[in-house]
Each structure stands twice: as C-alpha cells, then as structure tokens.
Image (cartoon, grey):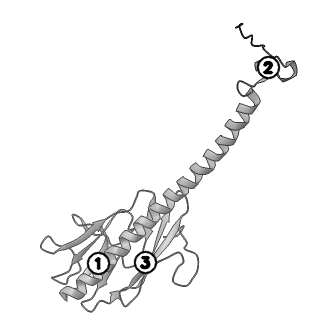
Amino acid sequence: MGAVQIKRMVYPDKTLHLKSLSTGYSLPELLLVIAILAILVSIAVTGVASMGNDQRVNQTAYQLFHDLSHSRSSALTRGTPVIVCAGDPGQGCRSEGPWSQGWFAFIDSDRNGAFSVSETLLSHNKSDRHVTIHWRSPNWIKFTATGGAWPNGHFKICDVQSGARTAVILTLAGRSRISSKSPSGAEIECSSA
C-alpha cells in the first residue's frame, strides 16, 4: 500500500485576515462612553442627594409625630397632664425659639408646667442640623388627662439646604398627623418663623 497523500486546499477568497479585526476601541468612542457615564452619574447623585434631604425632613416629622402620639397616650393612660416643649431636660422648656435644637416630653405630675427631676421624662429628641422646626406661641403643648391638646396648630419642618418641607398637624382633640400642606391646604412656608 502506498502512502495516502492529503491535499491542502486553500481558498484564497475565504481566508481570514486577522489584521482586519478590531482589537479595541478608538479614542473618540471611549470619550463618548465616558461622557455618557458622567451624565448618568451626575443625575443619580442629584437624585440620591434629594432623597437624603427628604429623608431628613421625614425622619424628623415621624419622630415628632411619634413623640406627640406617645405623649397623648401617656396622658390618657396615667390620667395626668403631659407637657411637650422645646428645650432640654437639663435646662427646661424654652419660652421661645425653634424646636430644631431639641424638644422633650414629661409627665407634669405637680401640674406646674415646668420640668423637675422628680417628674418622669417620656422622650427627648432633636432634629438634624439642616432641619428647622417652627411652632406657634406658646412654645409648648399640654396634653390633658382626657387626651385633648392645647394649643392646636402645626409644626413647620423644613430642610434649609434643599427646601424640602412637611408639617405635623395637631388638633385640639390631641390627634396629630403628617401632611405636605398646612391645615388650610396652603403650601408650607419655611422662610417665616
């Protein structure tokens, strides 16, 4: 038997030329992709920052709402007035000024409207440094043993950086709610105290 010879067939028009394949991206293509990514990242960062501002306002509103609800519940349960006021338990209630620096609630067992160390502290909170809280005068709220509140009104809670705003509305019945509008349905004005 003889050796089998294998012929190699070459098809010149079907050969693959490796030099014709692209091995990367050109500089203009890379710059275009980077520009698109930069635009998308800036949009995302703006949205995240806005959510953070809204979150600060919402967190403060929910904390204040919770403290008001807990204070009313405590007044009803214990049959004793509860005071919620701007200030610090160590220094007492402030007679004027925003609630942003802090507020606290206590059981007014001696019924004099002032906190003393013998009285029960129910809560003590303050807002983020970028959030302002304004309430009407007087600068305190009294929940009665029947659950009513005096005075009624609404807290204006505003982010000084973004302008995000909300309200915590308190009725004479002692019930509170969070709203994006003032009790009259108007926009919340953050510029005035």
Which label's residue is closer to the chain start, 3 or 2?
A: 2
Q: Is residue 28 above or below residue 103?
A: above
The answer to whether one can see residue 118 in this image is yes
Q: Amino acid at mark 2?
A: His
Q: Amino acid at mark 3?
A: Arg
**Whether label 2 touches label 1, CB < 8 Å:** no
The answer to whether residue 191 is left or right of residue 120 is right
Q: CA gap, disc 3 to disc 2?
A: 82 Å
| Residue at the extreme left of the image, as rendered | 118
The answer to whether one can see residue 160 in this image is no
Q: CA gap, disc 1 to disc 3?
A: 21 Å
Q: Amino acid at mark 1?
A: His
**On the image, which quarter does residue 120 sit in?**
bottom left
Viewer-nearest of discs 2 and 1? 2
| Residue at the extreme top of the image, as rendered | 2
Residue 108: percent from the left, percent from the top? 20, 80
**On the image, which quarter does residue 79 sit in?**
bottom left
The answer to whether residue 14 is left or right of residue 39 is right
Q: CA gap, disc 2 to disc 1?
A: 79 Å
Which label's residue is closer to the chain start, 2 or 1?
A: 2
Residue 39: percent from the left, percent from the top? 67, 44
| Along the line of sight, the residue nearer the viewer: 3 or 176 | 3
Name the residue tied to disc 1. Answer: 70
Residue 80: percent from the left, percent from the top? 20, 86
**On the image, which quarter does residue 85 sit in?**
bottom left
Which label's residue is closer to the chain start, 1 or 3?
A: 1
Name the residue tied to disc 2. Answer: 17
Name the residue tied to disc 3. Answer: 136
| Along the line of sight, the residue nearer the viewer: 106 or 66 | 66
Q: Residues within 10 Å of mark 2 (few under 14, many from 20)?
A: few
